[in-house]
Amino acid sequence: MIRFLHLLCFLAGLPVYAAAQVPLDKQKYLDSLQHVLSRAGPDSVKARASFLLSDYWSYTDSLRAKKYLEQGRKLSEKYPYLQALAWFYEAGYYFDHDVPSSESAYRKADSLLSRFPMKEAYHFRAKAWRNYGLQQQLKDDNKAFADILLTKTIPLAQKAGDTTYIGSCYQDVGLVFMNLEQYAKAEAYYGKAISHLKTDLANKTALAQTYLLGAKNYIFLEKYPEAKTMLDNALDLLEPYPGSALFLEYYTGEGMYYSRIADYQKALKSFDKGIALAKELDQAYSLQELAFQKYKTLTAQGKYKSAAAILMTILEQREVMSRTGNRKMIYSELSQTYARLGDMAQAHRWLKKYNELSDSLHESKFKRDINELEAKYQNAENQKKIVLLQSEKEKAVLSARNNRLGNWLLGSAFVFSLAVAAFAIFYYRNSKKLAVQKEINYRQQLKEMEQHQQLTFANAMLEGEERERKRVAKDLHDGLGGLLAGVKLNLSSWAAHKAIPQQDSRLAHITGQLDNSIKELRQIARNLMPEALLKFGLEAALRELCESVITGDLRINFEAFNIERSLPLTSQVTIYRIVQEALANALRHAEASDILVQCSQNKGRFYITVEDNGKGMNGSANGRKTGLGLDNIKNRVAYLDGKLEIISAANEGTALNIELNVTG
């Protein structure tokens, strides 16, 4: 944000007011920023555009200014430098209506931007200090403003290498000296400003403003040709932009110039143009400045009545009359104007107001001076007390330090003793806990070893049992089975040789007994080691097992899901034995008419459900003493690291839910 000064030229030396340096082509400037926001692009670029729009609207529309400021802050979240820059634009937002917040934000911006040693950061720090100085100038502290410009703003602008901005700062210094009626010094600084600003023709606004201020300064110096040259230079820059607010400055300067050279008609014409534009742009201070200059011209023409009417209009403007200096000047001018009109009563009335205000100011200044003297005296007395108190404090501090040292040594010894005792107690308790824990761990390890040995022994027993079953089944099938088959063949051959008829009852009885024996033998061999399991796999063997026990009074429903042929043979045999034992238990004890056998596999887990509608058991068999059949099932489930759940109730049947681990 760039803040410029505007001189309310009622009389030389009146206060300076802050106004914005608005681009000469305002609409083009506004459209270009809106275009940046509307198109796709980085957040950093859009954040800068939002900040500039906030600056643009901060003078006319505070709601829009706040909106764009917040938008810029949001877009700057990822960029620390832009977050620092946001404080600069926030200070500009508060500049006119909350001076303390604005001053605080400018200092915050300078502090945060000082972390970035780059030219742009120096440039914005220079702007921040310049605007902060303007706020001091608005408090009638021209000295502070000049000091800030010369010691803060210009050195930072030089670091930034910004020739144009240095020129703007020289313009400010010139305006300070012009307000102090030191026109020769002001002329020198305006000259420096113009020489710097001419190097950047793109920044026409600052150069035009300097020409206009320089023209006024030459008018006060009564250098009228130089003033006219300055006005013409400014007009050359402003003509392409007829709606620019800088035309208000131009019409003021042009009217003052014509008034000083006694061309009053041209002067009044210039002032009237400026007044019309000020009303159009809603620029209250410029409007009153132009009105006051018109009053001066009418007075010079001797048109006192019209001049008095203008003063009365200015008197009604609260913004202008809120400053004591302005009120004094207007009261004085009214008194003189009414005296010229011969209305001595009104002249005396306004002179009295002027004197009362002057006396009030003098009394206020006198009281302020007395208070300052009293404050200095009190400060001197306080300094004496402070020195005495500091001496006493140093003695007390030394004594307290010695006491603290002694107490610290005693306390340290006591704490050390406590620490040693605490460590000893802790070590003893910890050693005791460790010993107890070691004993617990040792017992746990023994228990685990015992369980492991029992499991190993059980596994070995089961594996041995299966091997023995396989051997006995083979011997029965190949040995005794073959022998019985041979006996039957020999008997049939003998009967045929002896011509014994096949219908012979004794021969039929003997042959039937042999057939039953062979069938029973094969059934025993199948139970010992099912042939279908070895030939066709687990699913076929289980299906054959279920079908083999179906009778007219017993239905068995077998369901299989996703059983893999690649299961290890030992796992297949164990699963077969579990289902075989479960069916045997149901047949022997359940008195059931329907049995459901369901087997499924999910990768390394195998699930078995055997459910009947028999008479059930009294309560669950999970935790109570069980028979040999259930013990065999439990051992085989444990062999495959599985889980067994038995659900049973009297007259409601029994369900066995088994989950087995069949990986590798």
Image: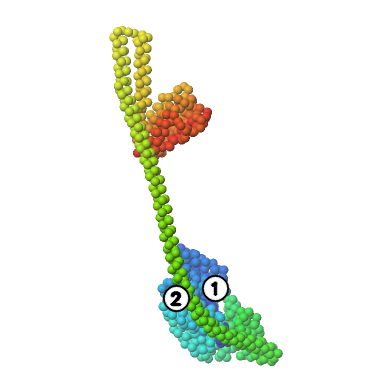
With 436 as the anchor, is 227 left or right in this view? right
Query: Quarter of the image holding residue 491?
Result: top left
Query: What x and y, as percent, mark residue 258?
Result: 56, 88
Kind of residue indicated by mark 1? Ser
The amino acid type found where label 2 is placed reads: His
Quarter of the image with the C terminus is top left
Residue 424 vs residue 36, the one in the foreground? 424
Query: Which residue, given by chain and number where applicable, does mark 2 sit on?
Result: 123
Q: CA distance from mark 1 to mark 2?
A: 22 Å
Q: Is residue 329 left or right of residue 513?
A: right
Image x and y of residue 11, in percent: 58, 87
* Circle 1 Cα neighbour tier, 10 Å, few/some/many (<14 / 14–19 / ≥20): some
Depicted 410 relative to depicted 606: above or below: below
Q: Are marks 1 and 2 in contact (CB under 8 Å)?
A: no
Residue nearer the viewer, 636 or 239: 636
Residue 426, x across and y down, in percent:
42, 55
Circle 2 packing at 10 Å, graded few (<14), some (14-19), many (20+), is many
Report if residue 85 is visible in the image: yes
Which residue bears the numbered disc 1?
Answer: 101
Please say if 95 is above or below 555: below
Q: Nearer the viewer, mark 1 or mark 2?
A: 1
Q: Callout 2: helix, strand or loop?
A: helix
Q: Which residue appears at 42% of the width and 29% of the height?
A: 628
Looking at the image, residue 117 lies above or below residue 551 = below
- The quarter holding residue 57 reads bottom right
Q: Residue at x 66, y 92 (%)?
A: 340
Check residue 5 in the rendering and tell me which mark sits there, or answer none: none
SS at mark 1 in the image:
helix
Q: Residue at x 52, y 86 (%)?
A: 178
Q: Earlier in the sequence, mark 1 or mark 2?
A: 1
